[in-house]
Amino acid sequence: MAVSMQDEEKGMRAQGPLSTSSDLIKSPSSSSPVSQSGNPFSRFILSVLETRGHDRIPESERLKCVTAIDYFRMGVLWFSTSITANNVAVGMYGPLGYNLSFVDSALCATFGAFLGAAGVAFMSIFGPASGNRTMVVARYFMGYYPSKIACLLNIIIMLGYGMIDCLVGGQILSAVADGNMTVVVGIIIVAIITWLVVVFGMKFFHAYEGWAWAPQLVAMFVLVGCAGPKFDTSIVSSGNTETLNGDRLTFFSLCLSSSVAWAPAGADFFVYFPPTTSKWKTFVSVLFGLGLSLTFANLMGVGLASGTITNPKWAEAYDTSSGALIVAGFDGLGGFGKFMGVIIALGLISNNIPGTYSATLGFQIMGRHLARLPRWSLACVSTIIYTACALGGRNHLYDIFENFLALMGYWVTIYLTIALEELLIFRRTRGFDWDAWADRSKLPLGIAALATFLIGWAGAIVCMDQVWYIGPIAKMVGSDGADLGIWVGCSWAMLVYPPLRYFELKKFNR
């Protein structure tokens, strides 16, 4: 499996827009437990799946230079990942979940998507700079042991996205089959295809991910042309001023959470880029790749949801599932419309595989024993977990979206606040020793970060508005409350971290 850097770079560039932006086809580390094994099955696995773990990528194994095409490919990776049906479903909750007008929903979805994408873009710059995975970089902001909390939460995010992808894909396939296929069967089909690609089809995945935006974009434009005339842009928001503002803020926070949830994986796919990679070009590429795809998908959801107000057939479809509503948007196209529905359902694979990949890295970062397990086995475990969750939650997609995404948004934004202040205030002169990623004596103790993280969570709890709990401060907004968790959590973290970190550095100089 050992290849020269020049030959590998040529091979990567030949596989499509994603290839140079991902490391999944790189040669395994010589220290990999699989590579040391003489077991024939292990050698077979090694031949089809990269087995490098979470260790830092040395500069000698990275690309030699970065061209304009490479920055474009960064954006394509995130565009392909996010122009998917699960993000269409997120947009539906503006008009249908929060009774917002088309304009209010569209504005909240657009600005929420781009603000969240900015958080992902910020974390992405650390991939080329450090050669470390995102949750390894977290050690420099939160300390060796406290960062494991963020790592565990990131695993939950990625497995949660796997659950949502399988569930929405299952709904679409069931709707395409006119109910002759159950959602359960659809979920299993999506999960099995994802598992096969993750474990046995890395080269196929790279070719697919590099061009996945094309069929998805075509299917979305067909949906615009077919369903667009039925969008009801005249619907108005309901409720008094206070309630309306609370609903706007809650939906905006939901869209922000949907986007920013990728931040804990932002650097994972760029660790093979050299340290000379431009930070601002990386930031802009990721920002627009992710922001544009999410905005497009979210707006499609807003439009479909608006049409249910005046279109009884669409309303009936939504009562079945959000996936059924997407398929109903292709009404009038006959078999071609069903084919487009299948394309959109299978497009969820491009969203699911990067999340599964990041989750397996997270398992390895959690501890030495898990790090010894080959990533293909962790991919199997991950797939089983989120498939089981999708099967169990198949009748509760709305609650899953509203609660899961919001809760993940709380901790990710608090973590980003800590990382941003650490970088801008305390690392301006100290810099980073990226070689010390596994040396606990050279990493921060994390006392200030952990205390800040918990204080931020306390602020989020008293201000959250969820089905199962409404914080006392959240209840004060409007008649239905409002989800202020992200904003209060970040504000508290922003205020307390600088003095706590200052005293930590003064006391321990770490």
Image (spheres, rainbow, N blue to C red):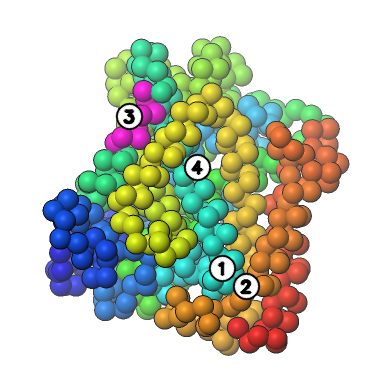
Residue that badge 3 annotates: 189
To which residue does mark 4 refer? 160
Quadrant in the picture for the N terminus: bottom left
Q: Residue at x 54, y 71 (%)?
A: 144
Sequence-wise, the earlier of marks 4 and 1 is 1
- Image quarter for residue 352? top left
**Residue 369 in picture, x, y percent from top left:** 40, 61
Q: What residue is shown with label 2?
A: 446
Q: Give the percent coordinates (x, y) of residue 72.
A: 35, 60
Label 4, label 2: how many angstroms apart (C-alpha)? 27 Å
Kind of residue at badge 4 = Gly
> Which one is in front, 30 or 373?
373
Badge 2 marks a residue whose secondary structure is loop
On the picture, is 33 further left or further right than 502?
left
Residue 486 in the magenta stretch? The answer is no
Magenta-drawn segment? 185-193
| Marks 3 and 1 close (CB-CB < 8 Å) | no
Q: Which residue is mark 1?
A: 145
